[in-house]
Image: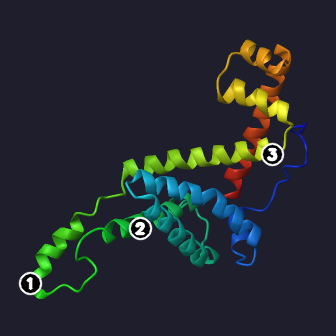
Amino acid sequence: MVNPKDDSYPTRPSLLVRLKDTEDQQSWQEFNDLYGKLIFGIAIKTGLTETEAQEVVQETLIAAAKNLPEFRYDPKVCSFKTWLLNLSHWRVKDQLRKRLPGLHRPASPDEGTARTATIERVPDTSGPHHEALWEKEWQTTLLAAALEKVKSRVDLKQWQIFDLYVLKEWSVRDVSKALAVSVARVYLAKHRVGALVKRELKRLQRTME
């Protein structure tokens, strides 16, 4: 059983700082595991196919790898979250443009107006709606990552109690009966695992500052 005060959750340097070292494979894998899912989810929700969404993920992460060493964190100018949103937005629009006929061949002088109209048919994936969608997916991704990390650090019974009672919203008595544990133990597991999840969420958020 993991105690919420356990040092298995050490305060680490910001992930953004560590990513500036292009040779830090562990940090880049962490970045890919966490934000690849986020970018993929956003791409799917904007109407792309799975193949197109995978291309968006790959191209966005490549662009991030190229530009992160020069990225300067200044929330007054541009937060990392906004910066990554812009990268993914541009790659989603690239995929949508590829769907339009004749967009990639050189335009003749007589095609100018028609070509402009074609480009204007590319759906707008920016604006408040897209930002709200990104924020929702961002929080969902962080929570999923925090839950997965905590699940690997607590004993199985404790996680089962937390999963049934908190995540699946079973009644405390049903959890107690199904897992053959006392009601007091259900409440205790909720408190202890919940504290670890909150701590891991804060850590994830802090690493992206």
- Which element type, helix, strand or loop, lies under badge 2? helix
- Residue visible at 55% across and 58% down in the picture: 81
* Cα gap from disc 3 to disc 2, whole angstroms: 36 Å
* 2 or 1: tag closer to the N-terminus: 2
- Cα separation, mark 2 vs mark 1, equals 28 Å
Query: Which amino acid lies under the numbered mark 2 shown in the image of this protein?
Result: Trp
Mark 3 crowd level (few <14, some 14–19, many ≥20, 10 Å Cα): few
The kind of secondary structure element at disc 1 is: helix
Residue 79 pos. (x, y %): 55, 60
Q: Look at mark 1 in the image and give the residue it sits on.
A: 110
The residue that mark 2 highlights is 90
Amino acid type at circle 1 is: Asp
Q: Name the image quarter holding the N terminus.
A: top right
Q: Earlier in the sequence, mark 3 or mark 1?
A: 1
Horizontal relation, residue 121 to residue 133: left or right: left
* Separation (CA) of disc 3 from disc 1: 63 Å
Is 85 or 48 nearer to us in this picture? 48
Which residue occupies 73% across, 39% down?
A: 198
User: Which residue has dot 3 on it?
Assistant: 152
Quarter-of-image position of residue 160: top right
Image quadrant in which the C terminus is located: bottom right
User: Which residue corresponds to the image point at 66% horizontal and 59% vertical from the top-left?
Assistant: 33
